Amino acid sequence: MQARGTNFDEMFDGAGNTRPAYAEYCRWYHEQPPEFLRRKNREADDTFRRTGITFNVYGENEAEERLIPFDMVPRIITAAEWRKLSKGIEQRVRALNSFLYDLYHRQEIVRAGRLPERLLRGNDAWLANMVGFTPPGGIYTHIVGIDLVRTGPDEFFVLEDNARTPSGVSYMLENRETMMGMFPDLFSRIGVESVSNYPRRLARSLAACVPPAFGGGKPTVAVLTPGIFNSAYFEHAFLADQMGAELVEGSDLRVTGGRVQMRTTSGYKPIDVLYRRVDDEFLDPLTFNPDSVLGVPGIMDVYRSGGITIANAPGTGVADDKAIYSFMPEIVEFYTGERPLLPNVQTWRCADKDSLAYVLDNLAELVVKEVHGSGGYGMLIGPTSSRREIAAFREKLVAKPDNYIAQPTLALSTCPIYTAKGLAPRHLDLRPFVLVSPEGIDITPGGLTRVALKKGSLVVNSSQGGGTKDTWVLKD
Amino acid sequence: MLGRTANGLFWMFRYLERAENTARLLEAALRMALTRDVVTAEAEWRSVIATLGLQRLYEAAHDSYDGTTVWNFVLRGASNPGNVRAMFGTVRSNARESRINISSDVWEAVNENWMRLDRLLARPVGQSAVGEVLAAIRRAGTQVHGAFDGSILRDEGYHFARAGTFIERADSTARILDMKYFLLLPSLSYVGSSLDTGQWEQVLRSVAGARVYSWLNAGQIEARGIVEFVVLDDRFPRSLAFCRNALRDCLGALARTHGVEGSAVALMREADTRISHLTVDQIFEQGLHEFLVDFLARNNAIARAIAGDYRFHA
């Protein structure tokens, strides 16, 4: 997808002057000998490869491990910008949790006529056995990633809410470690908010949500991973390691005595809080997909009877599909009584006849996404697609319009990346990470900046060749 | 610690040890082949394959024993699923699986060596490269063990890793000795014989003990002394006695951590009463081969008992 019109650039204004947030960084950058920067750029790759910060790409031979390319030019956000953003994010996350509670209880929002009931009934992520159940602490989304895009100085939009199992936080942390290792002098010259205590905050946040069956003492927290072939395995191990939690697989777990227990070298030991990085449908073969070997038979019964906390709660996916997304402004207003501080991207719901007609007429201009899709798969980017591709997509769309939404092709902001020929602007987005516990909502300053590495490309997903940048929130 | 993780650490270090021992075996054979006639060389390559228990697989794929074919088969042969390249793959995937129980130093040592070896072993290894490749395999073991000793918490994970190391090392030393036992037998009747001392030296070289043995014995090579050194000398880190002492320590530490002695400790005690006080003469009397077969069986039984005692499997 090609950006059109003039894009907002994070580093330079229209006249080519450096924006204040980047002033000190640019001064530093121009003081560095070009050969030094070239060498550092090569070193960065070696660092990631040596430390094994890789991800596996589905569909590649033998689950080959790849690096997510790292760009050494940071993305910088001012303290004032961040204050505004974090207020909007907090409001949105608060609304998401209230919304989930309501959906699985009285459904006031449906009764009030603000959300069509069919969006719930027909929703694959809806879990009937969450109805009437309140998770420990009343928390549904312990960890949320809110994807933001920018189109102008004050124009940030929410592109997507990730309320299931958002990933990428390990890259946020490792990118910072790498930057500090490569350019220590930068951090002594420029005050940057620290991100390194995220794992400790996550551990604290999870420990604050113990289930009724918790026996006192130090809660036992475990990270549930599908295993070493999962694309995000590195992150699962990284977080467990940093939190001092066990890293478990389904085969380590069984249900006895009303608890989920893990097989340790000295016998089975109950888990209090399970940070699962396994999708709902694989969590419990007794309740969901009977073929799943990734989950734990009977865990849903234990969960409902207060024997374990599952983070994020099963069934949260109902709040982050793209059809619900289009209702987020109403949802925020309904539960917070406030106007949304962060706007949505304009979205046409193809389930609506009028919208569908508009989308079909304008396919070549729009981005069309699957309601449940992620990772940049299964979408149509009108402006860069051939007529044949558009025609093929049109058939899928007409056959199952409920499955799609469409959005305009946004003029995403750019930020320079380091290239062999010097700095070159590339499009990017931002995923801040939010922790929710009974103690409150905790947003790590910054987040993960994903950047398209191809000139003009708007696709930032790592599975589609995107890279990442260290993200700085400046201290006041 | 999870039972699965304990299993991962145990086997990570077994495979690391196996790769290193395999490299030593190949290095010794390579030296032998370079200094002897073609017939002796072929016998030596044949004995490498036999020591590693790969005859059937090898002969299904190849009809002659020459150096290049043998070491490529052992190091990277597609028809040999237990090749050294695959061993390192297993070391690394076990390290990944046990990532939260090993330090970054250990992980990086494993990962960097895996990257290097995987590249070195991606293509056939020729005559001029094989020395460098074998040295790189040995160095990988040294680096991982070094990082491990310097950075790992001395909790149960440490002991599972060490138990794996010494079970595997004892297994390897016993197998190498057993393959050559017939060479060492005549020594009782031929004191100071004119037998091929080069062959005996080969046994020492395969267990990385040639230099230290020769230093301890003022250069005198004789079969009885070699057996005593490789089986009973508990100062030599690849001897059976050393491995047994180290393993006994691991089992003791694990029992203390868990507050209960498992079946592995009982098997160790039983083995102690049977073989601990044997002299080299008694070993020759009962038969070196019989002794080694019994040793290997006990060693294996202890490994299985560890897996059971500490719930390696569901």
Image (cartoon, coloured by chain):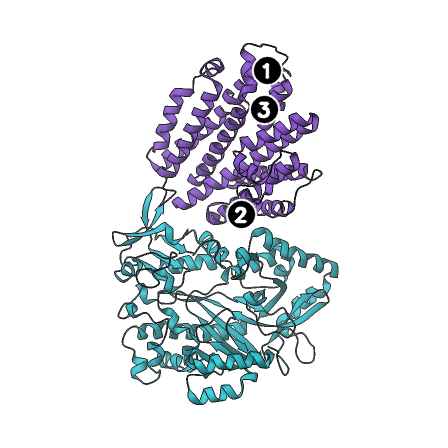
Q: Nearer the viewer, residue A465 or A137?
A: A465
**Same chain for the residues under marks 1 and 2 in the image:** yes
Q: Which mark is residue B104?
A: 2
Instruction: Name which of mark 2 and mark 3 comes first in the sequence.
Output: 2
Instruction: Name which of mark 1 and mark 3 comes first in the sequence.
Output: 3
Is residue A21 toward the left or the right of residue A143 in the image?
A: right
- Amino acid at the residue labelled 2: Ser
Q: What residue is rendered at 55% in x and 65% in y? A: A462
**SS assignment at label 3:** helix
Looking at the rendered image, the quarter that the C terminus of chain A falls into is bottom right
Is residue A321 toward the left or the right of residue A152 in the image?
A: left
**Same chain for the residues under marks 1 and 3 in the image:** yes
**SS assignment at label 1:** loop
Q: Nearer the viewer, residue A395 or A342?
A: A395
For mark 2, name the chain. B
Specify few, some or many for label 3: CA neighbours under 10 Å numbering under 14, 14-19, or 20 or more. many
User: Which residue is labeled 1 in the image?
Assistant: B222
User: Which residue is labeled 3 in the image?
Assistant: B203
